[in-house]
Amino acid sequence: MDRKALAEPPPGSPANPIPLPKTKKTLEAYYAGKRLESPQGGHLDILGIREGSTGLGRVLMECNTSSLRFVLRIPKATKTEKADIKKLIEAGEDLFCPRHGDDQRLTKSGKNWICALCGISYGKS
Ligand SMILES: [Zn+2]
């Protein structure tokens, strides 16, 4: 086996983005729609948002000064958030992201109600 083939891609490369600290401050700024500051200086531009395999959201970002890639993991929906959405589904109400607020509708993907900016499901119907 070639040792090089086993080596991890360098941190910050597209295949190996650096995890951003999942602090309340970072998440709140993200939910508020603010541009996040890069740990390298400058800002982070959002490249894409994916649903993670374990129910976490993955927001891929690129630093506009270093071009390093970062990833912000969005925590799963809480029991309270799910319970609130469930009530709204049952009442036939419009669904909005409990974190992003009333500008961000949840969209249906299969059985799941997803926030496209969080990359997570808040409920099923
Ligand atoms: Zn959201």
Image (spheres, helix red, strand yellow):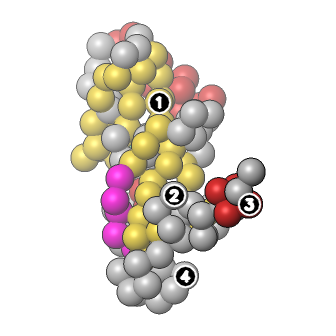
First in sequence: mark 2 vs mark 3:
3
* Spatial CA span between label 2 and label 1: 25 Å
Can residue 46 be seen from the camera position used here?
yes
Label 2 neighbourhood size at 10 Å, few (<14), some (14-19), many (20+)? few
Residue highlighted by disc 1: 121
In primary-sequence order, the first of circles 4 and 1 is 4
Mark earlier in primary sequence (4, 3): 3
Using the numbered discs, state the Cα–Cα distance from disc 2 to disc 3 in whole angstroms: 18 Å
In the rendered structure, which amino acid carries the disc numbered 2? Ala
**Closest to the observer: 91 or 125?**
125
Query: CA gap, disc 4 to disc 2?
Result: 19 Å
Count of marks placed on residues = 4
Q: From the top left corner, tell me how far across and down residue 77 is, in percent.
A: 56, 35
Residue depth check, mark 4 versus mark 3: number of the one nearer the observer: 3
Residue 15, numbered circle: 2
**SS state under label 1:** strand
Q: Which of marks 4 and 2 is nearer the N terminus?
A: 2
Residue corresponding to mark 4: 39
C-alpha distance separating marks 3 and 1: 39 Å
Q: Name the residue under label 3.
A: 3
Label 3, secondary structure: give it.
helix
Tell me the magenta residue range. Answer: 44-48
Q: Which is more foreground, mark 3 or mark 1?
A: 3
Q: Position of residue 91 (x, y in %)?
A: 35, 13
Q: Is residue 124 above or below residue 79?
A: above
Q: Depth-wise, is mark 2 or mark 3 nearer the camera?
A: 3
Q: Residue at x 37, y 38 (%)?
A: 115
Task: Specify whether residue 73 is painted magenta.
Answer: no
- Answer whether residue 20 is visible to the viewer in this image: no
